[in-house]
Image (cartoon, helix red, strand yellow):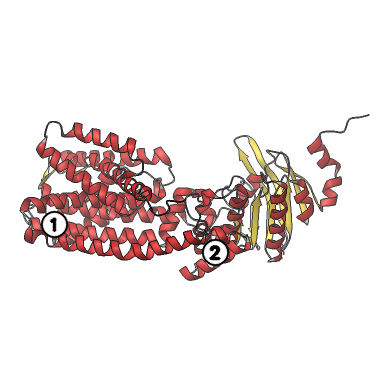
Amino acid sequence: MPILEGEGVTKYFGGLAAVSNVDFHVDEGEIIGLIGPNGAGKTTLFNLISAALVPKPGTIKFKGKNITGMKPYRICRMGVARTFQSVKIFANISVLDNVRLGSYFGKSPGLSSADATREAGEALEFVELSAMSATPARDLTLANQKRLEVARALATGPELLMLDELMAGLNATEVAQAMELVKKIRDRGITIVMIEHVMKAIMNVCDRIMVLHHGEKIAEGTPQEIATSDRVIEVYLGEQANA
Amino acid sequence: MVSRDMDITRFTSKGFFIPGLISLVILIGLATLPIYGSLYNVVLVTSILMYIILTVSWVLFSGPTGYMSLATAAFFGVGIYASALFLPTTGAVLPVLVVVLIGGLASSIIALGVGALTLRLRGIYFAIFTFGLVVLIMELLNWWELSVSHLLGRYVMLVDNNVIFYTMLGIFVLIMLTSFFIRRSKFGLAMRSIGENEEAASHIGINVTMVKVITFAISAFFMGATGAIWATKLTYINPHVAFNILFSFMPVLMAIFGGMGQIYGPVIGAAIFAYLQETLQTEFPYYYMLIFGIILVLAILYLPNGLVGLVQNLWKRRPGGQHADT
């Protein structure tokens, strides 16, 4: 049974269909890449899954349970965590407390203070930010802020983690480190859906890729299939000249 | 980094004992005030305590969440009317403490309802709505008194000054303890995260609506309770006296004046502010608003983090001050 399923997921902004009749499924333990040109509806789809937005029409199921229309905090407690395209850390709160908030509130039933602190410490160690526990989150570099967001999401104990452009704005070394991190998270048994523009990363770490264009799913398959798909090349590079 | 961590732990363990001791001394000093102080002092401290309670309870909600509430006067006024209903001059219907409790509960019930409806409004919209709430309740009551009950105002029975003082002191101790424990709890941390980024807070499992509404109601409880006991000092009330919009703005100004970064910031701000107000009003009855205004403008221009921020800056700057090298 897939861990996450979407049926006919649609979202209109005014007259514009940001996401239009998209069916998808994510199997347990997979790393799924979500790609597409700017404005294709990738982040909107993320927002629909994490319940920041409600699909209309369409249903989304997590572990076979319909989660359409639930509040974001409940979806998080069920085991779906996410990061944001523009980092949304708690800037004036210490790194440790940022993560501790995740372990306090992200699970039901909640953790005791000691357990939450211990789990937050482990999550920070996992993303290699332990040395900065006491620093206010605003003082971190962008790459570290993104790691902090991942740690905070992991602290909520997710079974499914959604990463929205984890690698955007990072330099080559940092991208390599981020790719390692993604694989490490998968090795912990967490299913991952990631939006990414860094093709090298997508092709390297993903088991399967979905391509969105103008809100519609236009292709799906293994990295090789996607890289050689005419439709995808057309969308990214424009139509081939008739020469 | 390591030395900094150690600095923080040393600071908190030391910083626990001394403030606790100071608080205890101040509390004993206050509790024994009616024994050694004059009646004037008791009355003055009562009104200073009233302002401190309003300010601290305003900060309890608006400080960490960043939702600027101007509803203080509404909750305060509801408390005042609770006294008018249950403590008329014809004789107390209920004991004073019970009325104080009713004032607080009525306010927090209103806060629960209003909060659930409006806490989705952000920024200036929330501020304007809460401001409107004060005017709405005032005008509704005004209409009710004129056309239904045919009363222009109501009289509240006289209560002994010491009773008022000790009730106020009791509420003060309760709000300080409440603030202190909420600040240190995971609930307080959740409130701060809402102020920092509400969307992210909701996506890491925080029921943001519940956290906001509950805190709003707790803060309203103390405002209402204070209003109920304050009413016995006013003796005559009408909707315009009870729902004076000044009580919405004063806590905000006092909190900014004192600085909201530390728990004692709003307390110090409110205490100095209220004392200034009382003395300026008696010493310079014609110029007091002018002097008051100038002090306020200067404070906002030159003390962005309030009095407490100023003291902390000076503390850091002194030779060999803590973190002087960072």
Amino acid under disc 2 = Ala
Left or right, A243 with respect to B68, comes to right
**Which element type, helix, strand or loop, lies under badge 1?**
helix
Q: Residue at x 14, y 38 (%)?
A: B280
Q: Which residue is mark 2?
A: A120
The quarter holding residue B291 reads top left
The picture places residue A98, in percent across and down from the top left corner, at 51, 57
Which is in the foreground here, disc 1 or disc 2?
Answer: 2
Using the image as rendered, state which of residue B21 and residue A180 is in the foreground: B21
Q: Residue at x 37, y 47 (%)?
A: B317
The picture places residue A96, in percent across and down from the top left corner, at 51, 60
Left or right, B110 with respect to B289, comes to right
Circle on res. B26: none
Left or right, A61 with respect to A36, comes to left
Work out how far the residue at label 1 is from the one at label 2, CA to CA, in angstroms.
46 Å
Q: Which residue is mark 1?
A: B165
The picture places residue A34, in percent across and down from the top left corner, at 72, 49
**Which element type, helix, strand or loop, lies under badge 2?**
helix
Q: Subunit of mark 1?
A: B
User: Can the viewer see residue B179?
Assistant: yes
* Same chain shared by disc 1 and disc 2: no
* Contact, mark 1 vs mark 2 (Cβ under 8 Å): no
Using the image as rendered, state which of residue B199 and residue A219 is in the foreground: B199
In the figure, B12 relative to B228: above or below?
Answer: below
Q: Subunit of mark 2?
A: A
